[in-house]
Image: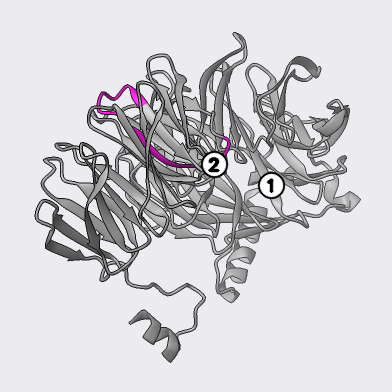
Amino acid sequence: QFSGLLGTVYRRGNLSFTRDGNSLLSPVGNRISLFDLKNNKCETLPLATRLNIVCVGLSPDGSLAILIDEEGAALLVSLIGKCVIHQFYFHKPVHSVSFSPDGKKFVVTKDNLAYLYHAPGKKREFNAFVLDKTYYGPYDETTCIDWTDDSKCFAVGSKDMSTWVFGAERWANLIYYSLGGHKDVIVACFFEENSLDLYTISQDAALCVWQCDTELDGLKPMPPKDAAKEKKAAEDDEELLEEPKGEEIHGKADPSEQETRNKVKYSRVAKYFFNKEGDFNNLTAAAYHKKTHLLVTGFASGVFHLHELPDFNLIHSLSISDQRIASISINCTGDWIAFGCSGLGQLLVWEWQSESYVLKQQGHFNSMVSLAYSPDGQYIVTGGEDGKVKVWNTSSSFCFVTFTEHNSGVTAVTFTSTGYVVLSASLDGTVRAFDLHRYRNFRTFTSPRPSQFSCLAVDSSGEIVAAGSQDSFEIFIWSMQSGRLLDVLAGHEGPISSLSFNPMKCVLASASWDKTVKLWDMLDSWRTKETFIINSDVLVVAFRPDGKELAVAALNGQITFWDHENAVQTGSIEGRHDLQMGRKELDKITAKQAAKGK
């Protein structure tokens, strides 16, 4: 059973706080992680989409979530049972999804349209995604959604620099309204609390404040006669269409005077600019807390601002990284602000009043290359191509220390038998030992001539460290106590791929791409004790915990077992049947391709 995800805390998509404000949902690739900030725990839900998740919609009661991937495939997920309830395909990439505050509807934006769906209820339904209305208006792709507090209306921002206010029902005095006033893509739009007044924010760091001449209570329902006529017209249209579109609402950017008579009117009361110095003017994310009137904006330079609206007073301005801030979310009390940076895979939760971090996590921003469990299974150490060595707690799934001393990719990591020392080998020509009591690099082992180390092993006493080189084909042996180089073992004719010490005897096994495994006797001045010829490049070698058998994995997909005392092969596993050549999605099926697979 899948239990957790380590190594990455955020990839892309929007962050969302749960209803109680104590937990944070973060999309990690095609999965979703739930960070419990009060109990300092993280769990990854045991479900996955086919592709990376780009948007997450959370129901107001916190029981349901809609996860949508890059191609528009959606999962309706129960956060209580942690299971998939329903699957749906939107046919095109979706930009954003948002539930109404009363939980009865949700809006999805794709292309230049907004779709209003009936939200799944508490009872069992044949289809959980029933389309209610389709809204036309923007000319370009839609980017963001916000609802009024009573779920009567919602606003949609677009890349065509306009913002549209639509009625969730057909109100006599508000069906649609188009707002301009910006010179760049709309990043976010927010309604004021219990009001139709609106804030719109564009990518060139401009904020417009819009005032409405009508209160929410002033929205009048449409006369039943007109509503029935509209509904019949919509039903007639639907019979002609293959794909149901529900009721259609077509908005016009410049309606005639007759159409705007006795309708809601908006006026722009203010326009503010965030300071234009440097890279500040590329605004990438924003969030607004209605009760405290707190606006948080994030920029491409990694800077974020806190403003109080409607007077636009600056409270804070801070830099959290040098990468673009991709997503911002504020919890229900307005105390905690979550930031996601997709470039570095960073996830931060900031308590703005005390100016302290509640959570600060970052994954490897390149591939993870190697990992090892600690002897007691409590920790996992990982090494990445970004040169970082990270130690993770397996029960909380958090990284609690990162070592950045290496200047190049880390190729191998391991714990000593005590579990308090982590060793790492790197392409920068060093092997480093880190102390988990004081979190410091207390030993650095180097070779006489610079070598790129590809593998690493430490003996059961923790006194002898061995590393294999991928360019000079040699094995280097050091003393942990003194840090001195004890010996250099030559004999292999290809890069060293793996090393393993026998837990019971003073024997080191080395595997190489030269199709051999060599055993070296530590007590007999590192003489070669035995050489096993394998019929393919050797990738990994490992001793059984009792030291009586040796397992060797090779490039041809075969695992062989050896009785190393008597140099006899005792068995093998044919892995090739499981690792059969796959077919790429875009490959044509031809005779040649079929033969290749066989």
Quadrant of the frame with the N terminus: top left
Report which quarter residue 87 is drawn in: bottom left
- Residue 62, numbered label: none
- At a point 51% along the width and 34% down the height, the residue shown is 388
Q: Of residues 287 and 340, which is closer to you in this image?
A: 340
Residue 81 seen by the camera:
yes
- Please rate how many residues cluster around mark 2, counting C-alpha atoms within 10 Å: few if below 14, some from 14 to 19, many from 20: some
Which stretch appears magenta? 407-421
- Residue 450, numbered label: 2
Q: Is residue 450 left or right of residue 411?
A: right
Q: Position of residue 14 (x, y in %)?
A: 57, 39
- Please rate how many residues cluster around mark 1, counting C-alpha atoms within 10 Å: few if below 14, some from 14 to 19, many from 20: many
In this rendering, the answer to whether 313 lies above or below 272 is above
Residue 7 seen by the camera:
no
Q: Secondary structure at mark 1?
A: strand
- At a point 86% along the width and 25% down the height, the residue shown is 275
Q: Is residue 214 left or right of residue 255?
A: left
- At a point 39% along the width and 72% down the height, the residue shown is 582
Residue that carries the numbered disc 1 in the rendered image: 143
In this rendering, the answer to whether 183 lies above or below 255 is above
Q: Secondary structure at mark 2?
A: loop
